[in-house]
Image (cartoon, rainbow, N blue to C red):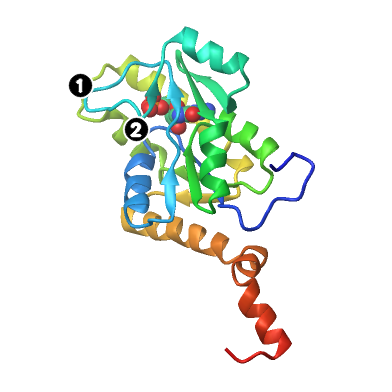
Amino acid sequence: METRNHAPRQDRGILFVVSAPSGAGKTSLLNTLLEGDPDLSLSVSYTTRSPRAGEKDGEHYHFVDKAQFEAMVAEDAFVEYARVFDNAYGTAEAALREVLETGRDLLLEIDWQGARQVRARFPDAVSVFIVPPSVVELERRLRGRGQDSDDVIAARMNCARDELSHYGEYDYLIVNDVFEEALSDLRSVVAAERLRQPRQAARRRDALEAMLAGDRD
Ligand code: 5GP
C-alpha cells in the first residue's frame, strides 16, 4: 500500500478533482465527459443532506445521517470532508483507493475545501476549476426559472463568489461559456494528463524496453 512518503506509483489511476461555483454548469459538463469516457469514473460522496427529487442513494450520493457521518470521521474513513452550506460532505478513502489501484481514473466533484485536503494527501492529483464567463451570465444562471427572491439570488451570488475566490489554487481553469468548447477543453485536460511521460512510460514499459533492446515484435 502506498504511504504518504513514497513517490506516486505511475501505473495507478489519475485522480481528477473538479470544483466550480454553482451556476458554472459543472454537473452537465461532467456528466457528458463521463458518458463518453469508460476509463473515468465518478466518486460517490457521502452527505448528510437530504436527497433531492430524482436522486438515488448510492448513485448520486451515499445519504447518511449526522451520527453516521461523524462515526466515519472518527474512524478516519474520509480522504477529505467539508461542511458546505448546512451539510457535511466527504469522500471515502477505501472506495477511492480501490478504483485508483486498478489503474482506473477517478473524478471527484468536490468544493475548494475538499480540493485542498486532497492536494495535500495526493500531490499528483490534477485539479480543475470551472467558471462561468461573466457576472451577468452567472446571475442569469443562478436566477434559474426566476422564481426566487432577490435575497435568495444575492445569497447564491455570495456563495458563488466565495468558491470563485479559490480559482488560483487549481491546475486548470476552464471557462464554461459555450458548452461544447468547455467540454472539449475538459477532454483535452484529461487526455494530456494521460499522456504525461511517466504515466505513458509505465503503461508502455514492455514495448519501450523491447525497442531499446532491439527486439523485433
Ligand atoms: P450539492 O448539495 O448541490 O450536491 O453540492 C453542494 C456542494 O458540495 C458542491 O460544491 C459540491 O461540489 C460539494 N461536494 C459534493 N460532494 C462533496 C464531497 O465529497 N466533498 C466536498 N468537500 N465537497 C463536496
Residue drawn where x is 45% and y is 43% of the image: 131
**x and y, in percent, of residue 45 in the image:** 45, 29
Residue drawn where x is 66% and y is 86% of the image: 211
Marked residue nearer the N-terminal end (1 or 2)? 2
Q: Quadrant of the C terminus?
A: bottom right
**x and y, in percent, of residue 121 in the image:** 68, 36
**From the viewer's perspective, is residue 211 above or below residue 141?**
below
Q: In this image, 42 relative to 128: left or right? A: left
**x and y, in percent, of residue 105 in the image:** 50, 51
Residue position for label 2: 139
Point out the quarter of the image occupied by ligand 1: top left
User: What separation in Å lies between label 1 and label 2 (alpha carbons)?
Assistant: 13 Å
SS type, badge 2: helix
SS type, badge 1: loop
Residue 128 visible in the displayed image? no
Residue drawn where x is 39% and y is 41% of the image: 26
Residue type, mark 2 in image: Glu
User: Which label number is shown at residue 147?
Assistant: 1
The residue lying toward the viewer, choosing from 158 and 91, is: 91
The residue lying toward the viewer, choosing from 149 and 45, is: 45
**From the viewer's perspective, is residue 144 above or below residue 101?**
above
**From the viewer's perspective, is residue 86 above or below residue 210?**
above
Residue 127 picture quarter: top right
Q: Is mark 2 within 8 Å of ligand 1?
A: no
Label 2 crowd bin: few (<14), some (14–19), many (20+), radius 10 Å? some
Residue type, mark 1 in image: Gln
For the image, the number of numbered tags is 2
**x and y, in percent, of residue 161 in the image:** 49, 29
User: Which label number is shown at residue 163?
Assistant: none
